[in-house]
Image: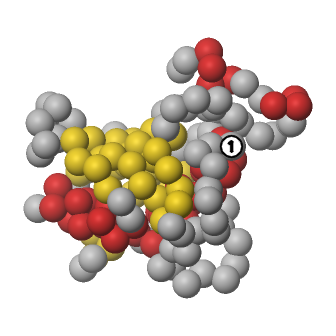
Amino acid sequence: MNDFCNIRPNNEPGRHFCGYGPVSVLIQVTGRQEDSFTGVAIPLCGSVPPFAFSSFPQLTALLDELCDELGRPMRSEALNSFSGSVSPLRLVPAQPVTTRKLGHFTIEILYRQNQSLQGRIIVPGRGETPAGRQSFRSDIELLHLMREYME
């Protein structure tokens, strides 16, 4: 963990701020049903513990919550995830997966604009080639890339 990940503006208790760069999260996929995934997300910055997700829409909403918790990247407008959830979501702590996973990759969230997440998905073992690092401009594009890497 880098030193800049421990910055807390105004000494706000309970808030975890990483002052610079993207929000990086290791995603461990443990299950797949049709177009959705279940698994564990492990933030790679700050002191936020790993958290579970039970669907792709929930994952995108929780990633947005994580960005709010870390205080970056700033959103240009409210996220309009296709989850349709009206109840507030909470990061539910979970343990990293040590058994066989269906897949794992890192998501770097660079921006939150146009009511969606934008960033990069990095697949370990594929190097820096386009097949190993792809940019996404929306939640739907991220879902497409996750599906592609899971095949």
Colouring used for the render: secondary structure
Instruction: Identify the residue shown where x is 14% and y is 31%.
Output: 127
Numbered-mark total: 1
**Residue situated in front as seen by the camera: 74 or 25:** 74
Q: Is residue 106 left or right of residue 10?
A: left
Instruction: Identify the residue shown where x is 36% and y is 60%.
Output: 137
Q: Is residue 29 left or right of residue 149?
A: right
Where residue 86 appears, as percent x and y from the top left, is 67, 83
Outermost residue toward the top in this view: 3
Image quadrant in which you'd find residue 8? top right
Q: Callout 1: 10 Å neighbours few (<14), some, many (20+)?
A: some
**Residue situated in front as seen by the camera: 148 or 30:** 148
Q: Is residue 96 left or right of residue 37?
A: right
Q: Is residue 110 left or right of residue 89?
A: left
**Residue situated in front as seen by the camera: 6 or 74:** 74
Where residue 126 appears, as percent x and y from the top left, is 12, 36
On-image quarter of the C terminus: bottom left
On the question of residue 96 being in view, the answer is: no
Residue 86's place in the image compared with 64, above or below, is below
Instruction: Identify the residue shown where x is 69% and y is 79%.
Output: 87
Where residue 144 appears, as percent x and y from the top left, is 24, 67
Residue beneath disc 1: 71
Identify the element where label 1 is drawn.
Answer: loop
**Residue situated in front as seen by the camera: 122 or 110:** 110
Q: Could you tell me the amino acid type at mark 1?
A: Gly
On the question of residue 43 being in view, the answer is: yes
Where residue 121 appears, as percent x and y from the top left, is 30, 47
